[in-house]
Amino acid sequence: VQNRDFAKAIGKAMGRPSWIPAPAFAIRLLFGEMATVVLDGQRVVPDRLNAEGFKFQFAEPLAALRDILK
């Protein structure tokens, strides 16, 4: 899931707007070197779990977030 889509899902699950992006310079000030992980992201795929036939309980982040917040 791209960060933009995840942020929208969080906003929707919490009933709040999520259209205001955080400025990159502020993220860099807060996180230092870790900012690259937040700003650039990482492509993570659960190959091993998929190969073993694991089925995730929630296929979409919005469903998972709503479950967490209820």
Image (cartoon, rainbow, N blue to C red):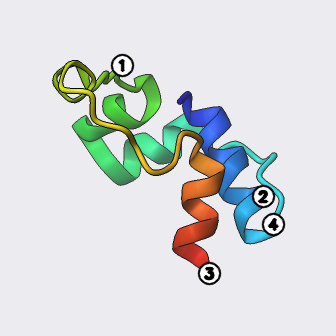
User: Which mark is first along the chain, 3 or 4?
Assistant: 4
Mark 2 vs mark 3, foreground winner is: 3
Q: Mark 2, mark 4: which one is toward the viewer?
A: 2
SS type, badge 2: helix
Q: Is residue 66 above or below residue 37?
A: below
Q: Amino acid at mark 1?
A: Arg
Q: Would you say the residues marked 2 and 4 are in contact, meaning their CB atoms lie under 8 Å apart?
A: no
Res. 70 mark: 3
Q: Residue at x 77, y 48 (%)?
A: 20
Q: Measure the C-alpha gap from mark 1 to mark 2.
A: 23 Å
Judge from the rendering whether residue 61 lies leftward or rightward of residue 32; answer left or right.
Answer: right
Instruction: For marks 1 and 4, give the CA distance.
Output: 27 Å
Q: Tell me the element at label 4.
A: loop
Question: In the depicted view, which residue is nearer to us: 15 or 34?
Answer: 15
From this view, report whether residue 26 is shown above or below residue 68: above
Dot 4 amino acid type: Arg
Q: Which residue is mark 4?
A: 16
Q: Type of residue at label 3?
A: Lys
- The number of callouts visible is 4
Residue position for label 2:
12
Q: Nearer the viewer, mark 1 or mark 3?
A: 3
The Cα atoms of the two marked residues, 1 and 3, are separated by: 29 Å
